[in-house]
Amino acid sequence: MAGEPTDPAAEHLRSSQPREPVGEADVVALARCHRLCLPETASSRAGLSVLEGLYRALIRDRDAEVVWRPGDGAEPHLGAFAAGTVALRETELAVRRSLSAVDFARLALRVAAMPMHVLARRRWEQVIPSAGIGYVLTLGSATAVTGHGRGARGRDVLADLEAWFVARGARESWVDTEQSNGRAIEFYRRGGYVEVSRDYGQVLLKKPLPSG
Ligand SMILES: CC(C)(COP(=O)(O)OP(=O)(O)OC[C@H]1O[C@@H](n2cnc3c(N)ncnc32)[C@H](O)[C@@H]1OP(=O)(O)O)[C@@H](O)C(=O)NCCC(=O)NCCS
C-alpha cells in the first residue's frame, strides 16, 4: 500500500534476478577470495584445495547456497561471496564427509589449533534453532578488504543469501563471527542483526526475516 514502509529484504526478494550457477572456474576464484578476506580461518590456513573442496560440497548440498559475484576481467578473485544453509548440522556433517581423507586431516589439524569457534558452537547447540532459520556460514568482499577494484559489496551478497533463506521458508537469519572482528559485527548490526550471545571470543547474532 502507498506510504507503507517497505521491508528491504522482502523488496530484494521480489526484485532479485536468477543468478548464474557457480561453476568450477568460480570455485577456484572464490577459494582465493575467501583466503584473501579471511586469512585466519581454519579452512584458509588448511590451504586452497580444502577451501575449494568445502565450496564444492556446499554447491552440491541442496540445503546450502553459495552466492558468488566475481571481480572484473583478469581478477575474478577480487569478488564478493556469501554462503549459508537452512540445515546447519546436516550441512556441516555433509561437508566434512565430502572432503578427501587428506583434506579432512588438514582441516582437523587447523581446527584443533584454533578451537574457540568449535567451543562456542558447542555452547550454542541449545541456543541455535535446528529448523526454521538460515545460518550464514561465511561472507566477504575483496573490495571492502583490499580497497581495490569495484566488486560487489558485502551487503549485496548478504541480501542475496537472505532472500534465498526466505524462499526456503526461514524466519530468521543467524551468524557468528569473531569478537575481535568489529567491522563485521558493525556490518551485521547495520543490516538489522542483534547480538544473542558472546562466548569464547565469538559473537552470535540473529535478525528476523520477512515472510516469503
Ligand atoms: C564483513 C565485510 C563484508 C563488511 O564490509 P563493509 O565494507 O564494512 O560493509 P558494507 O558492504 O556495508 O560497506 C560499507 C562502506 O564501505 C565501502 N565499500 C564496501 N565495499 C565496497 C565496494 N565493493 N565498492 C565500493 N565501496 C565499498 C562503501 O563506502 C560502503 O559505504 P556506502 O554505504 O556509502 O556504500 C568486510 O569487512 C569483509 O569482507 N571482511 C572480511 C571478511 C569477514 O570478516 N567476514 C565476516 C565473517 S562472518
Image: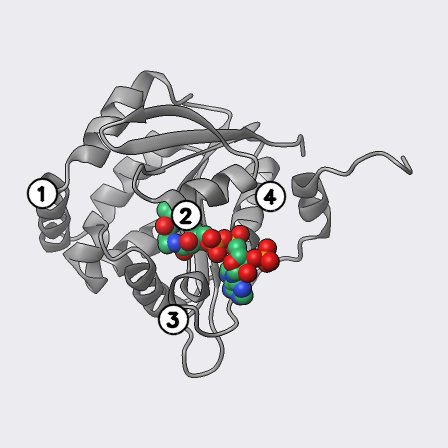
Q: Position of residue 26 (x, y in %)?
A: 40, 68
Q: Position of residue 47 (x, y in %)?
A: 18, 61
Which of label 4 and label 3 is nearer to you?
A: 3
Q: Name the residue under label 2.
A: 183
Q: How is the image coloured?
A: one colour
Which of label 4 and label 2 is nearer to you?
A: 2
Secondary element type, mark 3 = loop
Does ligand 1 reach within 8 Å of label 3's beta carbon? no
Q: Name the residue under label 1.
A: 113
Q: Earlier in the sequence, mark 3 or mark 2?
A: 3
Q: Which of 19 and 162 is in front in this view?
A: 162
Secondary element type, mark 4 = helix
Q: Mark 4 points at which residue?
A: 163
Q: Earlier in the sequence, mark 2 or mark 1?
A: 1
Q: Is residue 189 left or right of residue 56?
A: right
Q: Earlier in the sequence, mark 4 or mark 3?
A: 3
The N terminus lies in quadrant: top right
Q: Earlier in the sequence, mark 1 or mark 4?
A: 1
Q: Name the residue under label 3.
A: 77
Query: Who's the residue at 41% across and 32% down the image?
Result: 87
Q: Disc 1 residue type?
A: Ala
Dots 2, 1 in contact, CB < 8 A: no
Mark 4 closeness class: few <14, some 14–19, many ≥20 residues within 10 Å: many
Mark 3 closeness class: few <14, some 14–19, many ≥20 residues within 10 Å: many
Q: Where is residue 37 in the image (x, y as percent from the top left)?
A: 34, 59
Residue 62 appears in the rendering: no
Query: Who's the residue at 22% across and 63% down the image?
Result: 48
How far apart are the two marked residues, 4 and 2, measured between alpha carbons?
23 Å
Vertical relation: 31 (above or below) 123 = below
How far apart are the two marked residues, 1 and 3, measured between alpha carbons?
27 Å
